[in-house]
Amino acid sequence: MRMSRTTMMVFSALGIGINILGGTLAQVLKIPLLFLDTIGTVLVAVLCGPWWAAAAGTLTNVIQGMITSPKDIFFFYCQSCHWSYRWFYRQKV
């Protein structure tokens, strides 16, 4: 079944919210090497596809960089690589 663009936008917004919540939680608890800010990106990649996940991951890092620390903005590339791995693994390419 093909999803509508509105449904994909809602899932992307939900993924961004999950990423920001998880990233903030990991920063507040000061847990090293716990990447909770990628859970939403993986969810969007599985449900909507790679390009929506790339957009969600990039927007997560930009928004989180504006809210918590500017150094997070530069990690958008990691989010983009993460979605591609999960998507292609799911497609068995």
Image (spheres, rainbow, N blue to C red):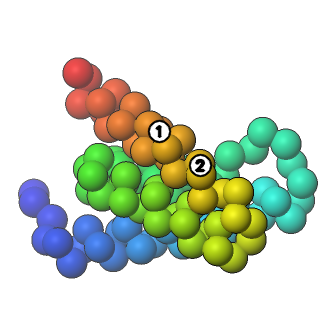
**Kind of residue at badge 1:** His
Q: Quadrant of residue 30?
A: bottom right
Q: Quadrant of residue 93?
A: top left
Look at the picture and state if 29 lies above or below 8.
above
Are circles 1 and 2 on residues that touch, CB within 8 Å?
A: no
The residue closer to the viewer here, 61 or 50, is 61
Q: Position of residue 1 (x, y in %)?
A: 10, 57
Look at the picture and state if 6 lies above or below 93.
below
- Residue placed under numbered mark 1 in the picture: 82
Q: Element at badge 1?
A: helix
User: From where the camera sits, is residue 23 visible?
Assistant: yes
Mark 1 neighbour density, 10 Å: few (under 14) some (14–19) many (20 or more): some
Relative placement, left or right, of 87 versus 68 is left
The residue closer to the viewer here, 2 or 83, is 83
Counting the numbered discs, the total is: 2
Q: Element at badge 2?
A: helix
**Kind of residue at badge 2:** Phe
- Residue placed under numbered mark 2 in the picture: 75
Relative placement, left or right, of 22 versus 48 is right
The residue closer to the viewer here, 35 or 65, is 65
Give the residue displayed 36% in from the left and 37% down from the top.
Answer: 84
Mark 2 neighbour density, 10 Å: few (under 14) some (14–19) many (20 or more): some
Q: CA distance from mark 1 to mark 2?
A: 11 Å
Marks 1 and 2, the one that precedes in the sequence: 2
Q: Position of residue 13 (x, y in %)?
A: 42, 74
Residue 47: image tag? none
User: From where the camera sits, is residue 18 visible?
Assistant: no
